[in-house]
Image (tube, helix red, strand yellow):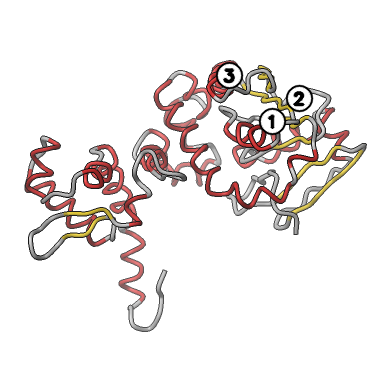
Amino acid sequence: MDTSEEIPYEIVMRQLLLGRLVSSALHAAVVLRIPDVVHEDPCTAEELAVHLDVNEPALRRLVRVLINLEVISEDPANGVLTLTPLGNTLRENVPGTARHSALLVGGPIGRCWDHLLAAVRTGEPAFDATFGVDVFSYLDGEADLQGVFYRSQAADLEITLAELVVVGWESYRTVVDVGGGDGALLEHVLTACPESRGVVLETASVAQLARSRMAAAGLAQRCEVVIGDFFESVPSGGDLYVLRDVVHDWPDERCAALLRVEQIHADLGCRDLPCGRAHRFSRSGTQFGLCGAHQPAGAIDVQVVPWL
């Protein structure tokens, strides 16, 4: 954000307040598949409206926003629209795509931000108050949205994979991914480390996604998918236990309960988990990565990270 003297603070504040309109425009562009269409066949706004079967004047307004955001560009000579490098990140099949994140922002998960004020006043999660269940229970009943959620997680992982190389995955015989989602992380690990085995611990509905991913990758024989509740127990026998983007979803008391689960607690060999820096704990040959992330008060993030 540029808060230099050239831009008055009054303008900067209005830019912040209008951020929601930016998200809405990007969400609309992704739902209409504008980035993919323009990438495959650069065209004018008029031609794009015909291709998408939408209202041309309204589309032109959206296109102007996308040009201003540098998502697409327009040739002043002929009006042909082309995709920019920034806009390319919204295409479906590119590494680290932001497409699925855009869909989440414009869907039920994003709409919960409408109830932020009530959450601050009551301390209750906005999603629970809006839909009557927690987000993961909701996803269990919405297969399409659940798929978008885990594809978003997998795309986010692709952005950080280079940093995670320093973990030295090849040094561990069995890697247990606690709350490992659809198995995206272990797919990368086991593909890179042919001598290693993996275990994904997940709920019943998500476990099937992990099994499908491992089967498609030819890794089903080297990765066990276990159905369970990580607040109650985790599989034993791991040389490395990983919680990636897990405990920031839960309040402190649930995080404490998770870290007191017998297997995890024994391998951690500790109780105090200060946030704000990375830690490496080792006991009996098992290592566990902890990192305090920039999350709302009442949550900590635990994940394997580059050790500082």
Three-letter code for the amino acid on which mark 1 is drawn: Val
Looking at the rendering, which quadrant does residue 213 occupy? top right
Mark 1 vs mark 3: in front? 3
Q: Nearer the viewer, residue 297 or 90?
A: 90
Q: Quadrant of the C terminus?
A: bottom right
| Marks 1 & 2, CB-CB < 8 Å contact | yes
Q: Residue 122: x percent and y percent?
A: 52, 41
The residue under the point 8% across, 41% down is 55
Spatial separation of the CA atoms under disc 1 and disc 2: 7 Å
Q: Number of numbered discs present?
A: 3
Residue tagged 2: 234
- Identify whether 11 is placed above or below 39: below
Q: Residue 100: x percent and y percent?
A: 40, 38
SS class, disc 2: loop
Spatial separation of the CA atoms under disc 2 and disc 3: 18 Å
Looking at the rendering, which quadrant does residue 196 occupy? top right
